[in-house]
């Protein structure tokens, strides 16, 4: 049940950051690893990562896996590339439009995948998501179905049924006063960091939601979501929602898992105070593997390593990534939709006229070994 995993030696990790401007004016940041990939082939598998609630590539639970996954084979690693897709406003990514992110909004991941697939057309893409990011990855795979550019998925501590798990979160002292308020506080800190940028259009619904969200005192996650996320967590016409519970019902992933059409591994812990309800039947989908460990807390799974505290999940996740990237023959009967660059330089996908990306200036070497001031890690 550790909330802030500073009790062990986290693996050092440095990335190359790329900023992408989205067609709606927003910005996302992609952190590529390893820093020197000059010896990797064009068809080297790429792990596409979505981090947790307010985290980024600096999170110890991300580094624990990617340190090994991106290490050379001769040093005991998989020798893969990885790309951490940071949410808007997280891990130093600027806010450039009146929109944040949410558990159910998948278009930012979808457009990041456009870019990665276009940059490395020969490389298989394998998905890895943590907590909120696991929910986004799960929904993306379900929405894309047989057209998914990501050929497998792995979800750690996915919150699944957002409404039921929020109710469970608030039912215990630790859940409500440590985790829920910790998550609500992190989100409010994120708003304060981007207060000016989110209010550049005074009449916009997001700008109008800012003052009451900033005025909240020690909010739970539900209170913050009911004040702000239901308004600013995605684009119209889906957003805004009338209440947080309407948003939770829409953004849940437990009812779409049946639509996933690629191999998918989910690992949850039975003692996770954040996720009390897990769909162990996998929606009746034969491509889904559901694992529920007796312990592990929320994104913990700590165990004794060689001179340091390690995470139990690292080994099975690495095995799954290798299995689905190298050992399984995947069906190619339904090719992904065509990508093209339009006359204005936007990378787009056929059939999705509202989506598009451009690489913009900035980025460079990003030291993913710290955190962000005022943020609790491990969520």
Image: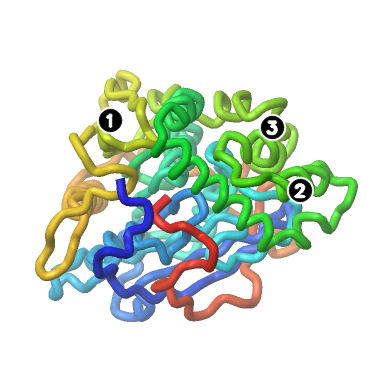
First-in-chain label (1 vs 2): 2
- Circles 3 and 1, Cβ within 8 Å, touching? The answer is no
Counting from the top left corner in percent of width and height, residue 208 is at 82, 44
Instruction: Give the percent coordinates (x, y) of residue 197.
Output: 76, 61
Left or right side of 220 for 331? left
Q: Earlier in the sequence, mark 3 or mark 1?
A: 3
Looking at the rendered structure, the number of numbered marks drawn on it comes to 3
Residue at image position (57%, 68%) is 92
Name the residue carrying label 3. Answer: 238
Q: Which mark is residue 210?
A: 2
Crowd tier of the residue under label 2, counting other residues whose Cα lies within 10 Å: few below 14, some 14–19, many 20 or above:
many
What is the quadrant of residue 93 in the picture? bottom right
Q: Which residue is mark 1?
A: 287
Instruction: Please name which of the two marks, 1 or 2, marks the residue nearer to the observer.
Output: 2
Question: What's the distance in space between the residues labelled 1 and 2, CA to CA?
Answer: 42 Å
Position in image of residue 200 (x %, y %): 83, 58
Q: From the top left corner, tell me how far across and down residue 2 is, in percent.
A: 31, 51
Q: Residue at (39%, 76%) from the top-left corner? A: 14
* Mark with earlier residue (2, 3): 2
**Front of the two marks 2 and 3:** 2
Direction right: furthest residue: 203
The Cα atoms of the two marked residues, 2 and 3, are separated by 19 Å
Mark 1 nearby-residue class (10 Å; few <14, some 14–19, many ≥20): some
Side of 329 relative to 52 (left or right): left
In-image side of 326 versus 13 (left or right): left
Name the one closer to the observer, 212 or 24.
212
Relative to residue 159, is residue 258 depicted above or below? above
Frontmost residue, 97 versus 321: 97
Locate residue 340: give its quadrant: bottom right
- For the point 34% across and 54% down, the residue is 124
């Amino acid at each position: 049940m550790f909330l802030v995993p500073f009790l062990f030696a986290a693996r050092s990790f440095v990335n190359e950051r790329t900023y992408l401007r989205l067609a709606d004016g927003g910005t996302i940041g992609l952190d590529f690893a390893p820093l020197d990939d000059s010896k990797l082939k064009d068809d080297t598998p790429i792990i596409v990562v979505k981090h947790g609630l307010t985290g980024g590539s600096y999170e110890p639970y991300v580094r624990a896996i990617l340190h090994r996954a991106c290490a050379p084979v001769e040093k005991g690693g998989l020798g893969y590339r990885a790309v951490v897709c940071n949410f808007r406003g997280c891990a130093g990514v600027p806010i450039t439009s009146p929109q944040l992110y949410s558990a159910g909004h998948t278009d930012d991941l979808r457009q990041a995948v456009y870019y990665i697939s276009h940059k490395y057309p020969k490389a298989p893409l394998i998905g890895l998501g943590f907590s909120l990011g696991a929910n986004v990855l799960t929904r993306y795979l379900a929405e894309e179905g047989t057209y998914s550019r990501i050929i497998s998925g792995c979800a750690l501590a996915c919150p699944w049924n957002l409404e039921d798990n929020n109710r469970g979160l608030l039912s215990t002292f630790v859940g409500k006063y440590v985790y829920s308020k910790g998550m609500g506080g992190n989100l409010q800190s994120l708003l304060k960091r981007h207060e000016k940028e989110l209010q550049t259009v005074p009449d916009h619904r997001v700008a109008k939601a800012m003052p009451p969200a900033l005025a909240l005192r020690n909010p739970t996650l539900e209170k913050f979501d009911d004040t702000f996320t239901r308004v600013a967590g995605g684009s119209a016409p889906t957003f805004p929602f009338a209440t947080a519970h309407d948003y939770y019902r829409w953004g849940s992933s437990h009812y779409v898992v049946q639509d996933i059409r690629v191999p998918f591994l989910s690992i949850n812990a039975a003692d996770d105070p954040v996720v009390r309800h897990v769909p162990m039947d996998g929606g009746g989908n034969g491509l889904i593997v559901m694992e529920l460990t007796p312990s592990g807390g929320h994104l913990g799974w700590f165990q004794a390593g060689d001179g340091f505290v390690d995470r139990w999940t690292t080994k099975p996740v690495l095995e799954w990534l290798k299995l689905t990237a190298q050992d399984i023959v995947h069906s190619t009967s339904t090719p992904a939709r065509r990508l093209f660059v339009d006359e204005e330089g936007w990378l787009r996908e056929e059939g999705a006229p509202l989506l598009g990306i451009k690489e913009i200036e900035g980025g460079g070497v990003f030291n993913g070994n710290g955190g962000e001031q005022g943020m609790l890690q491990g969520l």
